[in-house]
Image (cartoon, rainbow, N blue to C red):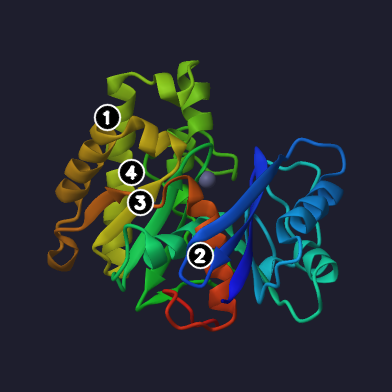
């Protein structure tokens, strides 16, 4: 049975798992990100998860930004890594016959939703995350879109509020600057989990506004949204987003675009990371398996 080593590298923890070619996570472990010497801790985690299990590929989802193919990663929420050579470090750690593929964590999750989650069977969709930040990945014509530098899908930086809040990217009124967990906390003084119904409603409306533009631009009719903030807000957030999307997406082909919660649960990031690996190997059954 072919097994992938999957790694999800985030601001809070680094998770590693063994994932079958069918997308089942059969073993998992994690270490906190906030340790002195993060790379040695990751290397130890990988060794402990692998034990003596042979793997055929390593897939990684990591916070951005990063250079193409994850050669150098500088995750915004991992300050100790700036221009860290992640792919090469993993390749050196693993046996030489295990190829390593690294991608943005939101793109990885989008792949995972198409493989085993709420976008199974969809050829065209956006998978996105609303948590500490806002990210996404788009699958069009059955292919995950990479873009020139591998950063396609950054829906968090669509402008949804002219003259809105300043965004970390340098612009104003970006979706991320208005509805991410960090932004909500900065704006209201409370964590997103304690947001008022009015804040949740407004956030949904802004998400729907962004998705209407995405639907018109890319001719997609499905948006799968996961992440702790979105899933924590739940039905009122999704209902507001759907109403706003319906009101804004008026051009005929974009009508009826649905926004739904992600279905992968806590294993989503590892399933997505594994999908990055299988895609890298060109396994055609993972949505978007075709690489450039
Ligand atoms: Zn921005």
Can you identify the residue that label 2 sits on? 152
Q: Residue at x 14, y 58 (%)?
A: 256
Which is nearer the N-term, disc 4 or disc 1?
1
Q: Residue at x 87, y 43 (%)?
A: 37
Can you tell me whether the CB of the residue at mark 2 lies under 8 Å from the nearest atom of ligand 1? no
Q: Tell me, yes or no, if residue 82 can be seen here.
A: no
Question: In the displayed structure, does residue 8 sit left or right of residue 98?
Answer: left
| Residue that appears at 41% across and 74% down | 287
Residue farthest to the top, as pictured: 189
| Secondary structure beneath label 1 | helix
Q: What residue did someone put label 3 on?
A: 263
- For label 4, the residue is 207
Query: Depth-wise, is mark 1 or mark 3 nearer the camera?
Result: 3
The residue lying at 41 percent from left, 18 percent from top is 194
- Viewer can see residue 216: yes
Task: Name the spot of residue 103 as percent of width and height, x first.
Answer: 61, 64
Q: How crowded is the residue under tag 1: few (<14 C-alpha within 10 Å), some, or many (20+)?
A: many
Query: Which residue in the protein does label 1 denote?
Result: 201
Mark 2 touches mark 4? (CB < 8 Å)? no
Place residue 239 in its image quadrant: top left
Q: CA distance from mark 2 to mark 1?
A: 27 Å
Question: N-terminal of the two: label 2 or label 4?
Answer: 2
Q: Locate residue 52: give its quadrant.
A: bottom right
């Amino acid at each position: 049975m072919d097994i992938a080593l999957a790694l999800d590298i985030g601001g809070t923890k680094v998770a590693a798992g063994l994932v079958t070619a069918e997308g089942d996570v059969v073993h998992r472990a994690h270490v906190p990100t906030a340790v002195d010497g993060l790379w040695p801790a990751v290397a130890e985690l990988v060794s402990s998860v692998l034990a003596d299990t042979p793997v055929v590929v390593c897939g990684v989802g990591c916070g951005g930004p990063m250079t193409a193919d994850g050669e150098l990663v500088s995750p915004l929420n991992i300050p100790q890594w700036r221009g860290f050579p992640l792919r090469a470090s993993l390749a050196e750690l693993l046996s030489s016959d295990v190829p390593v593929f690294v991608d943005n964590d939101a793109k990885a999750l989008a792949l995972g939703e198409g493989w085993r989650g709420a976008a199974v069977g969809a050829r065209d969709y956006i998978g996105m995350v609303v948590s500490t930040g806002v990210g996404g990945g788009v699958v069009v014509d059955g292919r995950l879109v990479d873009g020139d530098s591998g950063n396609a899908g950054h829906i968090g930086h669509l402008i949804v509020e002219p003259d809105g809040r300043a965004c970390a990217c340098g612009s104003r009124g970006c979706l991320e600057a208005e509805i991410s967990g960090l932004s909500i906390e900065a704006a209201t003084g409370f964590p997103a989990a304690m947001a008022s119904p009015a804040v949740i409603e407004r956030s949904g409306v802004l998400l729907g506004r962004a998705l209407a533009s995405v639907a018109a631009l890319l001719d997609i009719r499905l948006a799968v949204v996961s992440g702790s903030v979105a899933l924590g807000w739940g039905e009122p957030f999704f209902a507001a987003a759907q109403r706003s999307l319906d009101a804004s997406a008026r051009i005929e082909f974009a009508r009826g675009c649905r926004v739904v919660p992600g279905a992968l649960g806590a294993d989503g990031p590892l399933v997505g990371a594994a999908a990055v690996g299988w895609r890298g190997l060109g396994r055609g059954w993972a949505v978007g398996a075709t690489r450039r």
